[in-house]
Amino acid sequence: MTRSFDRAFAVGVAALALLVPLTLAAITVLVLIDSWPSLTTFGLSYFTTTEWDPVKLVFGAAAYVYGTLVTTVIAVVLAAPVAVGAAIYLTEFAPRAVRAPIAFTIELLAYIPSIVYGLWAIFVMVPVMRSIVEPGLQATLGQLPVIGRLFSGTPIGLDLLSGGVVLAIMILPILMAVSREVLLAVPPTQREAMIGLGATRWEAVSRAVLPYARPGIIGGAVLGVARAFGETMAVTMVVGNSSRDISGSLFVPGYTMASAIANQFVEADSDLYFSAIVEIALVLLLVGIIVNGVARVLIRRSIADRPAGAVI
Amino acid sequence: MALTPSSAIPARHRVVVRRRIAEGVVIGLLLLATLVAVTFLVTILGYVIVRGLPAIDLAFFTERPKPLGEVGGGIAPALIGTVILAAVSGAIAIPVGIAAAIFVVEYRSGRFAAPVRFAAELIAGLPSIVIGVFVWALLVRGLVGHYAAIAGAIALAVIMVPIVARTVEEVLKLVPNSLREAALALGAPRWKVILSIVLPTARAGVITAAVLALARSAGETAPLLLTALGNDFFSTDLLRPIGALPLAIYRYAISPYDDWHTKAWGASLVLVLVIGVVGLLLRVVARQRVR
């Protein structure tokens, strides 16, 4: 009697648990099926052309891929130095009493929903970008040869640069939390040995701590990339959602892959249009799986067996 | 140490000075990075509080939105919608997540433990809009046939399961094996060991996991756009579209009306307060457990 109940309990737990891989399989299969018409109709040209025309039923998502890449690169380039710098300061140099409270405060940013970042970005950040930051960039960096192209056009605030900046603010907490976790996991003997040899604290950190923590920090950055890549709401609200061309300037409205789905999903009035939108989701799905896999391997190698923090 | 002309101090000393200066500069830059990060948090929170507070009065919590152009009204349908979505998605995701953790930790020998863990990690890494597309295809177009609260709840549940599963997994691993062995040695069957020894020991952690997942899902917007759709009227029907705080914020934020913008800030304040207080409480509880 007891034995048979034991068996039933095990089967019940297994049945519920197996819902998890089943869900992943169902997501992959459904998205694949729905994007099939687009996959077979456009093949590789889906990724190499920018014509996205629901009337002529021609769909090329290159501009969306470009928008996602540009905003993600901006986000990581802006956020990584700040996040890693803050993590180093908070684990190695800050007065002991303030370390945990400040780290916790910054990590609280991770709890703020992306829609709130979007709201803040629309009403506070975009006007500042339009009237101060973008004209400023144009007047300085915009005058340089080659790089100047990035800052050409009319500063409107609702553009790829704003999308990248809001993403940078959003991935800052997770980058910092992971870097901090990795730095805390570096054995104190690494620092002590260097300082015992007469190194200053910064020399100890830069030559004995950072090399040790490097895979984990890179893993954190990759995780930030994964976040930025699929982030939808905040970017959708400031990225402009209109241009479909690749112009080379950051001051043009654009689309990211996720914002294209959010904006056009309910508008899809033909099967092929719908399928082309779902193919964007398929790309996000595959990239999400690959990038997260890579990040987790890197971080795990650095943190070894410490339980991961809630933020990760 | 004063900076004397370089010829006046021995070469070794000069190196020390240079190293000290380098250290000072670097620490200054690191401090600057920290200040930048903190400033963004303070600014964003500050705006949410300052712009949100004027929106908040009794009507904000009890009334439904006024017709276009009229000032006043509230966001009560969205509040109720968020509570209903949280309850339904929690009722689905918490048992599944706990079961997945039990399966991975307590039935470790099973052939499928690794795939369950791996699948949970991969789902956790998916952009939430992809989950929205999936649930739209499965329910909104498929089983239900139209936009519905239940579709939104299931989308949120898919997002919550990996959070619950992985947090509970870590907690279950902390339960000492000697407890399990002692119970098994006394002749207790496996299910009893799990239900009356392991889970009660890990209770605080399990509750933390559930609350964390609920707090996370409360702010999700993108998947709800494709599933729950939003609703300005009071609705508790799981088969009809339902409102939610994040959906209300989105709709108000992209509207051209000042009064609606204020409402968006107010709704954000409510959302951030709920999530922030939960996050703070969890942190305090976690710290007490470590001590």
Image: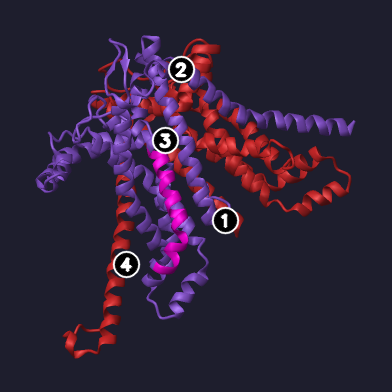
Judge the density around disc 2: few (<14), some (14-19), many (≥20) Cα neighbours within 10 Å: some
Displayed quadrant of residue A72: top left
Queried whether the magenta region covers residue B4, the answer comes back as no
- Place of residue B78 in the rendered image (x, y in percent of width and height, measured from the top left): 43, 24
Q: Which chain is purple?
A: A
Tag 2 and tag 3 share a subunit: no
Q: At label 4, which amino acid type do we have?
A: Ile
- Which label sits in the foreground, 3 or 1? 1
Res B150 seen here:
yes
Q: Which mark is residue B27?
A: 4
Q: Which residues are magenta?
A: A207-228
The residue where tag 1 is placed is: A304
Badge 1 amino acid: Ala
Mark closer to the observer (4, 3): 4
Residue under the point 47% across and 54% down = A216
Check chain identity for marks 3 and 1: say if they share one: no
Residue farthest to the front, as pictured: A44
Seen at 38% across and 63% down, the residue is A89
What's the residue at 48%, 44% (across, down)? A294
Q: Earlier in the sequence, mark 2 or mark 1?
A: 2
- Dot 2 falls on a residue whose secondary structure is helix
Q: Which chain is red?
A: B
Label 3 and label 1: CA atoms lie apart by 36 Å
Density class for disc 4 (Cα within 10 Å; few <14, some 14-19, many ≥20) is: many
Between the C-alphas of marks 2 and 3, the distance is 39 Å
Secondary structure beneath disc 3? helix
Same subunit, tags 2 and 1: yes
Cα separation, mark 2 vs mark 1, equals 41 Å
Q: Which mark is residue B271?
A: 3
Instruction: Note whether B246 is above or below A111 in the view shown.
Output: above
